[in-house]
Image: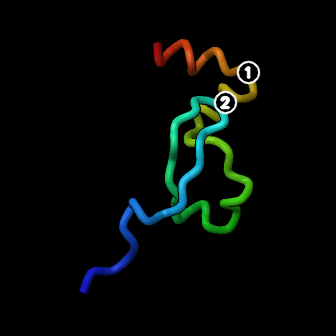
Amino acid sequence: MPRGVKKADLPQKTCATCGRPFAWRRKWARDWESVRFCSDRCRAAGRKGREAVVADRA
């Protein structure tokens, strides 16, 4: 019998910096409501300004 949950069934949010969707992770279980960024890079860019990540995507 398979264990766990399929990735498609996990809750998702949109990153406040890059705008990409990201899924729930186990390490975020306690504070999922306060998670806003998909990665450390986006969190750092969110403090500086949105231009850094958006310029890299283009």
Q: Residues within 10 Å of mark 2 (few under 14, many from 20)?
A: some
Q: Residue at x 67, y 21 (%)?
A: 50
Category of crowding for the residue at label 1, using alpha-carbon neighbours closer than 10 angstroms: few (below 14), some (14–19), many (at least 20) = few
From the viewer's perspective, is 44 left or right of 8?
Answer: right
Name the outermost residue toward the bottom. 1
Disc tally is 2
Q: Secondary structure beneath disc 1?
A: helix
Q: Nearer the viewer, residue 24 or 19?
A: 19
Query: Which residue bears the numbered disc 1?
Result: 48
- 57 horizontally vs 16: left or right: left
| Residue 33 picture location, percent across and down | 71, 59
Q: Does the residue at mark 1 contact the one at mark 2 (Cβ under 8 Å)?
A: yes
Q: Does residue 48 lie above or below 26 as drawn?
A: above
Indicate the quadrant containing the N terminus: top left, top right, bottom left or bottom right. Answer: bottom left
Residue under the point 66% across and 60% down: 32
Q: Amino acid at mark 2?
A: Ala
Classify residue 17 as left or right of residue 4: right
Say which amino acid is labelled 1: Lys
Q: Quadrant of residue 18?
A: top right
Q: Is residue 30 above or below residue 42?
A: below
Q: Where in the figure is residue 24, as x and y percent of width and height?
A: 53, 58
Q: Which residue of the protein is positioned furthest toward the front in this rendering? A: 9
